Image (cartoon, helix red, strand yellow):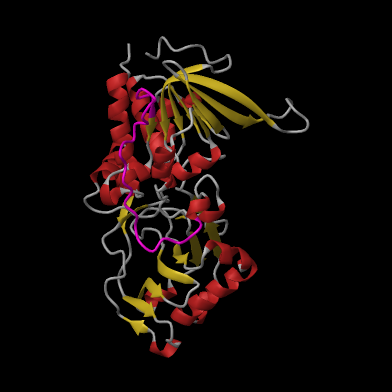
Amino acid sequence: MSVENRPDRSEKLAFADVVIIGGGLSGLATAYKLAKLGIDFQLLEARERFGGRILTFESARSSACFDLGPSWFWPGQEHIKGLITELGLDRLIYTQYSSGDAVFEAQDSPRASLQRGVSGISMEGSYRLQGGLIALIDALVNQISLLGFGDRLSLCSTAVAVTKLSDKVRVSYSQPHSRGQSIGGGTIESNIICQQLVIASPVRSVLENVKIDPQLDTARQAELETVATWMAGHSKVVVEYKKPFWREAGFSGDVISQIGPMSEIHDASSNSNHSEPQAFALFGFLGIAPAVRKQQAERLRELILAQLVRIFGDQANSPIELVIQDWAAEPLTASKHDQFIADHHPINHWSTTIEPGWSGSLIWSGSETANGHTNGYLEGAVLASNQTFQQLESRLKPT
């Protein structure tokens, strides 16, 4: 459907060619491609923000931005690099800091015998974006708006049911009452009829929170429940400092620890070659199971700083910011099957991403649907979007 023939959206939305559930990288990339072709769509994002697992924290002290979700992409990952370049953000790319000694902290190792200068544990050669990956999300939202489809992006819109009709799909979703509509709060449920449905959210979370009608058969349900959500059980920590004392002491900031609470640590500082003032930080992943993290919530800050002091010295005990993002506590990311810390990168196996029995009208998208080792990564999210768009383009031609 062309832009000129789109229905008037001053009235309540009732129809779209495509509905996308999920406003993370994959869902927004698909929406961007549809907007460029003038194909009508509606994107529903349950959160109050876009980005999904991409989440950037802005420091109240320095106004610097640090990623609380994914941080890196790598040379050779041409899908994510291509999107960044198309959006004019390649000038923001910089290389992960890796100069200096990495550290291995063994279970029975006192500070005096930390293994310094260990190889193979840095993220040397990986890329990051100045200002955090939220720059990529913001650019996609801005471009969709410039193309005239900004009103097709809906926040606080939670999909609750998807129903196969004879030749279309009905998507039911809820939104909070706006002020003035309801004194007591609550939600409003609405429906959209579409030709094509794209689910660009973590599969396990969708299975737990969205009613699918007709119900998936037992074998298909079991297959989809094996689709592991990468990093869903993890918790990420960012600790900002006034200066990079670890660099001054000859450390790269890279740590692998058997003691914890952080099992892995890296330098999260901004780009020294960019025009903005440089900010300095370390980030790490907690090696504590989600259930135990809840029990130790009040002590986590103390434990984190004690570890950093143990490795880098007393200056680590005086951060200007310390933020903990526990992804396992977010039901839109982590399901009941994701309440553990994965010890390896999963490779999900799909018999098909086009749902059987739905006449091609339901497509599972998102990073976890990508093939091979891109699965779960930023590269996988863009690859999945590209594959989904090819499928949509063959079914929906703008008139």
The secondary structure that dominates the magenta segment is loop
Q: Is residue 330 left or right of residue 232?
A: right
Taking the view exactly as shown, the residue that stands out farthest to the bottom is 112
Judge whether 108 appears above or below 141 on screen: below
Q: Judge by depth and name the residue closer to the eye, 293 or 359.
A: 359
Point out the image quarter for the N terminus. Answer: top left
Residue 87 in percent (x, y) is at 33, 37
Residue 351 within the magenta-colored segment of the rendering? yes
* Picture quadrant of residue 383: top left
Q: Residue at x 78, y 30 (%)?
A: 183
Q: Is residue 189 left or right of residue 369?
A: right
The number of discs equals: 0
Residue 1 seen in the current view: yes
| Span highlighted in magenta in the image | 339-362
Residue 388 in percent (x, y) is at 32, 32
* Picture quadrant of residue 74: bottom left
Judge whether 195 appears above or below 116 on screen: above
Taking the view exactly as shown, the residue that stands out farthest to the front is 218
Q: Residue at x 28, y 64 (%)?
A: 124
Q: Residue at x 53, y 57 (%)?
A: 325
Judge whether 377 appears above or below 163 on screen: below
Residue 241 in percent (x, y) is at 50, 68
Judge whether 35 appears above or below 131 on screen: above
Residue 101 within the magenta-colored segment of the rendering? no
Point out the image quarter for the C terminus. Answer: top left
Residue 88 seen in the current view: no
Q: Is residue 81 left or right of residue 189?
A: left
Q: Judge by depth and name the residue closer to the eye, 209 or 269.
A: 209
Residue 361 in percent (x, y) is at 38, 24
